Image (cartoon, rainbow, N blue to C red):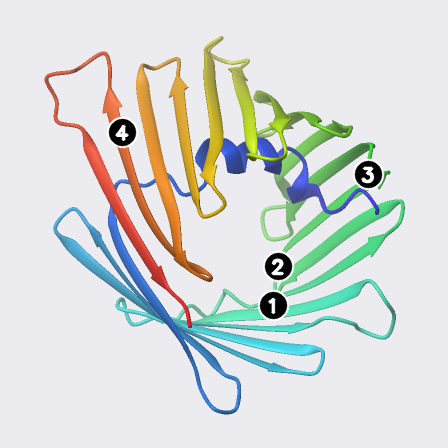
Amino acid sequence: MGPGLYSEIGKKAKDLLYKDYHTDQKFSVTTYTSNGVAITATGTKKNDFILGEINSQIKNKNVTLDIKTSSNSSLTATVTHHEVGMPGLKGILSFSVPDQKSGKAELQYLHDYAGVTASMGLTTNPVVSMSTVVGTKAFAVGTDVSFDTAKANFVKYNAGLSVTNADLIAAVNLINKGEMLSASYYHLVSPLTNTAVGAELIHSFSSGENTLTFGTQHALDPLTTVKARFDSAGKASALIQHEWRPKSLFTISAEVDTKAIEKSSKLGLSLALKP
């Protein structure tokens, strides 16, 4: 296996520390039509607002069409061709309505020793982005840059590296135009119970501030997972997730500020139903 794409550098630790934590109420249900179209309806209550989305996915051989409509009257369409002329090359075309400047064309290429992503906005003066990773599954380095042709300057330039062995993944990323450094690690303690620990340290060169987040996860049984995290700002979070039927998940998560106990804790509920 190759090094993957740039977005995968440090992803394992980020998923452990941040994925599925939320303080909103969310409900989603997925259905499939007779011709294989997948339709997912999602409702999210955020504070006093209720946001709704409907996602439709159509697959035909190597082409996938995703259409998302939301309660704010916007529509997003994404067409993905999984093999454009050669193995490992993927083409993606996306646009949103009514945003006329949202169109984007993207190419992704995965190789045994490299992963490349190139994208360009479909406008007169587009933003051009490119990320490259070289190496192996064990060691990889990469860069991620975006250039705004209208303003003739770089709007993003990041760099990162990752080291992976059987049970430990370490990553370092220079982000926010070199203003911040992120270092993370993920350690799989027990594959049998999916027990893992992880941490992320973010250092700001301009302010000198450090933010440290620790987290862990453990499978109580094959269908139930618990996670917990704590950061240097004093916020503690925990969740329990149960797969009560195949691919259908029920998640309860909570967050409390240990430096302001007088404030009420935040509770999030999520229910995802799939046939």
Whether residue 47 sits left or right of residue 167 in the image: it is left
The amino acid on which the numbered mark 4 sits, given as a three-letter code, is: Glu
Residue at mark 4: 255
**Between 225 and 16, the one nearer to me in the picture:** 225
Q: State the CA–CA distance, disc 1 to disc 2.
A: 6 Å
Q: Residues within 10 Å of mark 4 (few under 14, many from 20)?
A: many
Residue at mark 1: 122
The amino acid on which the numbered mark 3 sits, given as a three-letter code, is: Lys
- Secondary structure beneath dot 4 equals strand
Question: Quick check: 85 above or below 151?
Answer: below
Residue at mark 2: 126
- Secondary structure beneath dot 2 equals loop
Question: Quick check: 198 above or below 82?
Answer: above
Check if mark 1's residue and mark 2's residue have beta carbons within 8 Å. yes
Tell me which residue sits at (79%, 32%) in the image: 141
Mark 4 / mark 2, whichever is N-terminal: 2
Check if mark 4's residue and mark 2's residue have beta carbons within 8 Å. no
Mark 3 / mark 4, whichever is N-terminal: 3
Q: Residues within 10 Å of mark 1 (few under 14, many from 20)?
A: some
Residue at mark 3: 137
Q: Give the number of the disc on residue 53.
A: none
Q: State the CA–CA distance, disc 4 to disc 1.
A: 41 Å
Q: State the CA–CA distance, disc 1 to disc 3.
A: 34 Å
Mark 1 / mark 3, whichever is N-terminal: 1
Q: Residues within 10 Å of mark 2 (few under 14, many from 20)?
A: some
Mark 3 / mark 2, whichever is N-terminal: 2
Residue sitting farthest toward the bottom:
34
Q: State the CA–CA distance, disc 3 to disc 2.
A: 33 Å
The amino acid on which the numbered mark 1 sits, given as a three-letter code, is: Leu
